Amino acid sequence: MTDGKRRRGLAAASALLGGVLVLSACSGGGDDSASGDSGKGDSQAQVDEAAAKKSSEAQIKITPKDGSNNASINNSAAVTVAKGTLTEVKMTTADGTAVAGEISADKKSWKPSVQLERATTYKLSATAEDSAGLAAHENASFTTVAPDNSFIGTFTPDDGTTVGVGMPVSINFDKAITNKAAVQKGVTVSTTSGQEVVCHWFNANRMDCRPDEYWQEGSTVTLKLALDGVEGAEGVVGVQQKTVTFKIGRNQVTYVDAKTKQMKVTQDGKTVRTIPISAGAPENKTYEGQMVISEKFKETRMNGATVGFTDDDGEGEYDIKDVPHAMRLSTSGTFIHGNYWGAKSIFGSVNTSHGCVGLSDTKGANDPSTPGAWFYDNSIIGDVVVVQNTGDKTIAPDNGLNGWNMSWEQWKAGSAV
């Protein structure tokens, strides 16, 4: 074969091959190719359909959403399921520590059985099954609100206690509250006596609540804190969600007269005992006014240096390590307490103290027959002690639990709502 024939033959073969290739390429949009793609499409649809048939209908929801920050320590970690039942829920901290929780009786929900901690990352893994027994899974991780971005209120009295008729609800917040109205709306105080209760802000951190007159004896008071998520200041939210109840005991009010140096203890308006006392000396007068017993100590130490009574060497003018039957009346150090170091003759005749109210007592606080022991045993937190005729000023309402020294109009003026 000559070169020319050979080249012509190759060209023809090339053209033929090219035509076949072109025909094959164009055929991709024709019947043969369409038939092939249709088969492939049917195959994928069948796979998808089969997968769908194998998927669980159970729909798990975890609150808060995965990746959430500043999550509530009260309402987070809630797991619910629709179209199925929960079979397993696991919750751990970031370091793997397990968090206890419980699936509901109907297996439709789960929640932790312990209080969550602030500034902590938690991980949740939940499994549920639908009616066909097919399993569904859901996972989430979230971080609770940090202390720097949250506030709590320390309150008194404690849940389940019985207190005197003068005991206010007192809440001290660990952050300064600028949005007082929002916070106050999240605090509800009610009583079975039907008395109107109003809250009063002493400053940005403290709010007390009380009725116009002393609480009615035998009534029950309920404090509800619905502060979770409430913004108390810019970037600072509440985390508390709590209900507290306490009972009001018998109506005991004690009247201390520094002039007569006698103390009259009344219950339901009737005098049950009169006790001789020794109040503050002329140079250290006792505050006047209505004071509420906020703490009780069978024995306690009293050092004058802690309340500004010092000698030239800076040491306390007194340091008594075992003061018997002491009951606090003010934050600044006013007590009504037993006195074993003074002569028995001072009680009822002369005022000798540094501002406290003293009752005759014995060292060791073990003699129940003394006036100090009797008054201690017959007093409870929240009882009122009214101090009169000392010649000193009326105690400040925020010095202890002593807001009763404000008129009702003054008290209500301190409300933010």
Image (cartoon, rainbow, N blue to C red):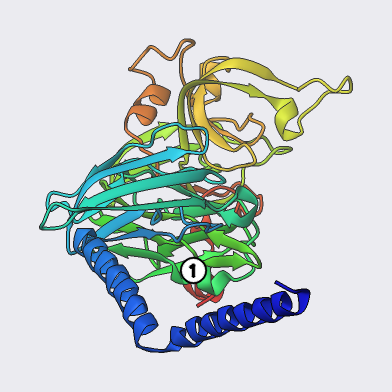
Residue 7: percent from the left, percent from the top?
73, 77
Q: Amino acid at mark 1?
A: Gln
**Left or right, 260 with reference to 193:** right
Name which residue lies at 17% across and 64% down: 83
Q: Is residue 183 visible?
A: yes
Question: Height in image: 350 above or below 142?
Answer: above
Residue 175: percent from the left, percent from the top?
63, 55
Query: As rendered, which of 171 and 64 lies closer to the eye?
Result: 64
Residue 378: percent from the left, percent from the top?
32, 32
Query: Which residue bears the numbered disc 1?
Result: 184
Where's the N terminus, which quadrant? Answer: bottom right
Name the outermost residue toward the right: 312
Question: Height in image: 332 above or below 375?
Answer: below
Name which residue lies at 46% across and 13% down: 362
Name which residue lies at 45% across and 72% down: 185
Secondary structure state at the residue bearing disc 1: helix
Q: Is residue 251 visible?
A: no
Query: As rendered, which of 99 and 198 lies closer to the eye?
Result: 99
Query: As rendered, which of 147 and 254 lies closer to the eye?
Result: 147
Name which residue lies at 38% across and 22% down: 373
Q: Quadrant of residue 211?
A: bottom left
Label count reads 1
Question: Height in image: 255 above or below 309?
Answer: below
Residue 382: percent from the left, percent from the top?
40, 45
